[in-house]
Each structure stands twice: as C-alpha cells, then as structure tokens.
Amino acid sequence: MSPEANRFLTMSRSFLLKAEGMRRQGWPDEAGRAAYLAALHGAQAAIFELSGKVVKTHRGVHTEFARIVRDVPGHDPEVWSFLRRGYGLKSIADYGIDPDVTVTDDEAKEAIRSATLFVDRVLEVLTRKDV
C-alpha cells in the first residue's frame, strides 16, 4: 500500500478513536461527525490507491469512491452507503440549526460501528491481490 493511502487510513483510525471518546463524553453529534470523517478518509485512501487521485471535496470523494468501488470484487453497497449516510451526521453537528434534530447516543454508536466496518472493508480491499 502506498504511503499516501496509509496516511489516509491512519487518519481514519484516529477519527474512530475520537468518535468513541466523544460519544463517551456525551457528545453524540460530534461522535457522529468524527465517524463520518473516518469513513471519508478511508474512501480517500481507496481512491488514491486505486486511481492515483487525491480528491478533496466531500462531493468529489463520494462520487469518485462510488465510481471506483462498484467494480471491486467484494463490493458491498450496504457497507459503502455509510459514506453518504454519515454525511448527514456531519451536517447535523456542523449546521444543527433545528434543536429538534440531534444525534442520539444510539445513532452515534451505530455510526461508529458502521464507520469501523467501512474502514476495515477499505483496508481489506486495498490489501487484496485481485484489486
């Protein structure tokens, strides 16, 4: 694996740890955002490793990631869909202008679980020989 992809995955793992710490401290909205960022950096690792591109915008990462993984052996739309779903959690944390729309602790737990699965699956794909 390239050093660049490895750096993205290191950032992913860091955000997963932050997400769990934030959730335990009673900040589920921040935990949801951190879980999304873990997946975002995982997607950037895959994009770089499989295409050589560095994509910086959220939309660009979502689009390019969807394009590259659809033909990857072991493609799992349910796992990959967290990238798009997780963006909603980030939006709530960043722009939460509606006090009735929050991230619950259970939602944060699920986001962390999904992001962990996402990052693990990215690593699995990137270390396979048939990619």
Image (spheres, grey):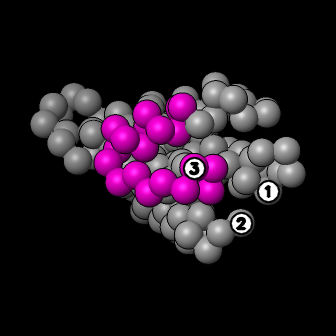
Place residue 127 in its image quadrant: bottom right
Question: In terms of secondary structure, what is the magenta stretch mainly?
Answer: helix
Residue 24 versus residue 10 in the image, above or below? above
Which residue type carries mark 3?
Ser
Q: Residue 90, image x and y in percent?
A: 33, 44
Point out the stretch of residues depicted in magenta: 49-67
Q: Nearer the viewer, residue 75 or 87?
A: 75
Residue beneath disc 3: 51
Q: Is residue 98 left or right of residue 8?
A: left
Q: Is residue 106 left or right of residue 123?
A: left
Q: Residue 19, image x and y in percent?
A: 48, 58
Q: Residue 18, image x and y in percent?
A: 48, 65
Name which of mark 2 and mark 1 comes first in the sequence.
Answer: 2
Q: Residues within 10 Å of mark 2 (few under 14, many from 20)?
A: few
Q: Residue at x 83, y 51 (%)?
A: 128
Q: Is residue 66 magenta?
A: yes
Q: CA distance from mark 3 to mark 1?
A: 15 Å
Q: Residue at x 53, y 64 (%)?
A: 8
